[in-house]
Image (tube, rainbow, N blue to C red):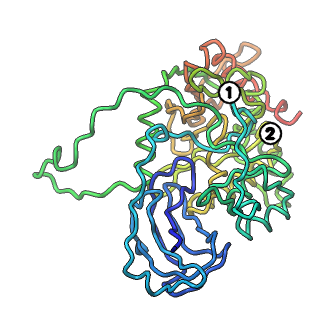
Amino acid sequence: MPIEIKMPALSPTMEEGKLAKWLVKEGDTVSSGDIMAEIETDKATMEFEAVDEGVIGKIAVPEGTEGVKVGTVIALLAEEGEDASALAGASVSAAPAAPKAEAAAAPAAAPAPAASAPAPAAPKASEGRIAASPLARRLAEAKGVDLGSVQGSGPNGRIVKADIEAAQPGAAKPAAASAAPAAPAAAPAPVASASAILDERIPHTIEALSGMRKTIAKRLTQSKQEAPHIYLSVDVKLDKLMALRAQVNETLASRGIKVSVNDMLIKALGLALMEVPECNVAFAGSELIKYERADISVAVSIPGGLITPIVPDANNKSFSQIATMTKDLGSRAKEGKLKPEEYQGGTASISNMGMMGIKSFSAVVNPPQAMIMAIGAGQKQPWVMDDGSLGVATVMSATGSFDHRAIDGADGARLMAAFKDLVENPLALIA
């Protein structure tokens, strides 16, 4: 019997992807762990490794094909003793229907152990061994990861490289969805097609939406439909923070590290969430997930959309650590080289449009998170100083968007006050 190689789900939210490139051809022999193809998801291009040994008998989906559903058979692999050439004319099965309950799945890899039930152990192969690719076994041994506690995402639950990279040494991989999703909202009215709304008198072009743009549209619509938003704004004086930044950068110059205002604001939001833990939460239907550290998702604009790489444990990181991490994450985000665990999850988000001259704005909550901080531009304006005199200060607007199902207005206000105090008295950020 030939082995069906199916389009993998490279992230919990992936429903389809583009088979960007085949790295093998019909007649090639592959071993477990060999890289077979590059698959483009809605966020990044990732390598797909073989989990079985054999000869490629048929490539069913040519490279460059877009919209390949998860579960679609993309190739057939001849096992030992099987005639690979005989598979060229073999028919392949279609992709299974996507489970409705998973249509709006939450991002994976929640950083705190808040799952209502532990992740299932890895399945055993027929000979009693844990089903894992050789590459995954080598990585697990190097990282000190117990294969028996890892949930596999490969075919038939096989543990692959990405599972080990996402696992913590000596601990089980966090469940992809840490709690039951909220009850689905009523189905939205269908969006009119381009042909239905097009005014032919106006010169135009029609461009198909990328997978990333489709995902952004879907998730933001879900957020606004399901999460009742509440918005709270404060004006924040930046002068002391900017003075501290100048001193920090002077100290770090010899190491080639430059800290941005946004790096410092990430730290401030992380500490504020620790001071007001009622806002470091996620709504999960009949449950509320309370996180014990602040993993801050940072909005980064990339060609064709937006991605939110995560600064984990931001409340405990130094300015230099955050600056180094955000520079690396931002660079790899623009190249489409982030790993799923680097942009899925997080406990809260920050979006800064100040560098574009935007004075203030309200951001949409990034589900399943329950809050996002929107940062505007710092502008010089009249300000009443501490001694009561009138002077000029650099002031920015910060607006918190909160999921009112999970966060009360009073708690949101406390978070905004804590954030403002940390930014205006920035020595507390390094104390």
Q: Say left or right for 404 vs 414.
A: left
Q: Residue at x 63, y 72 (%)?
A: 52
Q: Say left or right for 33 vs 197.
A: right
The picture places residue 5, in percent across and down from the top left corner, at 52, 68
Residue at disc 1, secondary structure: strand
Q: Say left or right for 249 vs 202.
A: right
357 lies above or below 50: above
- Between 134 and 316, the residue placed more toward the observer is 134
Label 1 belongs to which residue? 289
Q: Earlier in the sequence, mark 1 or mark 2?
A: 2
- Between 244 and 180, the residue placed more toward the observer is 180
Q: Residue at x 60, y 32 (%)?
A: 369
Q: Residue at x 57, y 39 (%)?
A: 351
Residue 247 found in image quarter = top right
Q: Residues within 10 Å of mark 2 (few under 14, many from 20)?
A: some
Q: Amino acid at mark 1?
A: Ile
413 lies above or below 125: above
Label 2 belongs to which residue? 244
Furthest toward the right, the residue is: 431
Residue 62 found in image quarter = bottom left
Look at the image and tell me in which quarter the C terminus lies: top right
Residue at disc 2, secondary structure: helix
- Between 88 and 391, the residue placed more toward the observer is 88
63 lies above or below 361: below
Give me the C-alpha separation between circle 1 and circle 2. 35 Å
The picture places residue 378, in percent across and down from the top left corner, at 60, 35
The picture places residue 80, in percent across and down from the top left corner, at 61, 82
How many badges with numbers are in the image?
Answer: 2
The picture places residue 130, in percent across and down from the top left corner, at 75, 59
